[in-house]
Amino acid sequence: MPFRFVHTADLHLDSPLRSLALRNGELADLVRGATRGALASIVDLCIAESVDALLIAGDLYDGSQTSMNTALFLAGELRRLDATGIRTFVIRGNHDAQSQVTRELTLPPSVHVFQGRSKPMLAKTLASGRTVHIHGVSFANPHAPESLLPSFHPPVADAINIGMLHTSLSGSQGHDRYAPCSVADLQRHGFDYWALGHVHQRQVHSEQPFIVMPGMPQGRDINEAGAKGVTLVTIDDDGRIEIEERPIGAAVFERLSVDITDAAEWRDVLDLVTRALTRLRHEISAENLILRLSLTGSSPLAWRLKRDADLLQTELANISAGLSGCWVEKIDLLCREPRAQGDRPSREPVEELASLVESEVLPAFGFREEIRAVAEELLQQLPPELRQTLAPDEDALEELVVNAGLMGSGNVLAHLHGAAAGGD
């Protein structure tokens, strides 16, 4: 009989809401409960596939915010596995190391939590007589600036060896540096499969041996967009390893950009968005699709869309409600007024001002630096989780500055245009 297991990491159970636009109470409840739903779905998958074990490579919790209620939910789900004879192997990640609850909770007897330099655990003896051993090292503290590889025992001879490690590897954009090591370092250690955690985007770094970062099973905001899942691993009696990605997340965040250049009327904008939403909803099989919508292009409707953004939000909420499990959490109005033809100055003063703002003001270094200074000051006044949402890296901060300039100037010009046109 083969040895089969599910490899997951970074569940961040009951993580605080990080999206800035979850004003809809029903949507907020959906996102708030999504991480619990992901764990329940992982347990369902383990039972349905009759696996031997579940491997959780760190960050079950979300740091010091962890409550006993969260921990009790976790214990209840692991008891479901225990009742069916499925073992669970866990390492603590940087977020788990911040939680006192992690150490206080009594887990079912089938759950093994690795400590520092733990002895390898015998997981199964295959029909061929070869044994499968699991190695793991947990974070003792929230920070691990040095590699944890020296804490691992060498591979068990003539056996299949699986290592569990929470690591940023050599570094990953948007993720702090933790327990750094290289893919080559892991390859040289001699294990057959490395079950990694920490980086939220799935990546198979190597197949000889397998070095797998499964990604998180459930995104929490638009910066964790795309389908999420876990890795189902089968090791046959001869030691051959096969891996398969399995979708888990019930709520998928996605970005959708719609060019409204061809829209002449308000109704045209709604039709363009409806068609784009419908296409994307048919492509995404997850139970819920949560969208960040951007309207782009050149349209005479740009000023009206910005002026009547509240009405647009209501209209699009009604449209998305007609598509099962589809939500528009935020609309970015990046569209602009058409430029005047040729070199002839625009007859409309507001249009001429808009052209000047676009060509001279927005690209100006001084103007961008002023916006950047304001943005950086505001970021310092926000909680850490919101800072990470708005500006996880330097590129995101620059995009925030550009969009702030575009949207701010666009809103002012939209109101000026509306006033000049007599309100419509």
Image: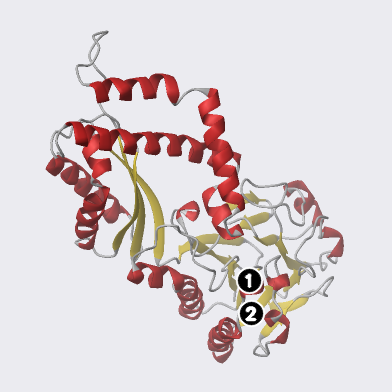
Tell me the distance, in whole angstroms, between the alpha carbons under discs 1 and 2. 8 Å
Q: Residue 358 appears in which quarter of the rendering?
A: top left
Residue at image position (26%, 55%) is: 282
Of the numbered discs in the image, which one, if any, rests on residue 56?
Answer: 1
Q: Amino acid at mark 1?
A: Ile
First in sequence: mark 1 or mark 2?
1
Residue at image position (21%, 21%) is: 348
Coloring scheme used: secondary structure
- Tag 1 secondary structure: strand
- Tag 2 secondary structure: strand
The answer to whether 306 is drawn above or below residue 194 in the figure is above
Residue 57's spot in the image, x, y percent?
Answer: 66, 67
Q: Are marks 1 and 2 in contact (CB under 8 Å)?
A: yes
The answer to whether 295 is drawn above or below residue 149 in the figure is above
Residue 360 visible to an observer of this rendering:
yes
Report the quarter where the N terminus lies.
Answer: bottom right
The answer to whether 88 is drawn above or below residue 191 in the figure is below
Residue 259's spot in the image, x, y percent?
Answer: 27, 36
Residue at image position (39%, 73%) is: 29
Mark 1, other Cα within 10 Å: few <14 / some 14–19 / many ≥20: many
Nearer to the camera, 13 or 26: 26
Q: Which residue is mark 2?
A: 88
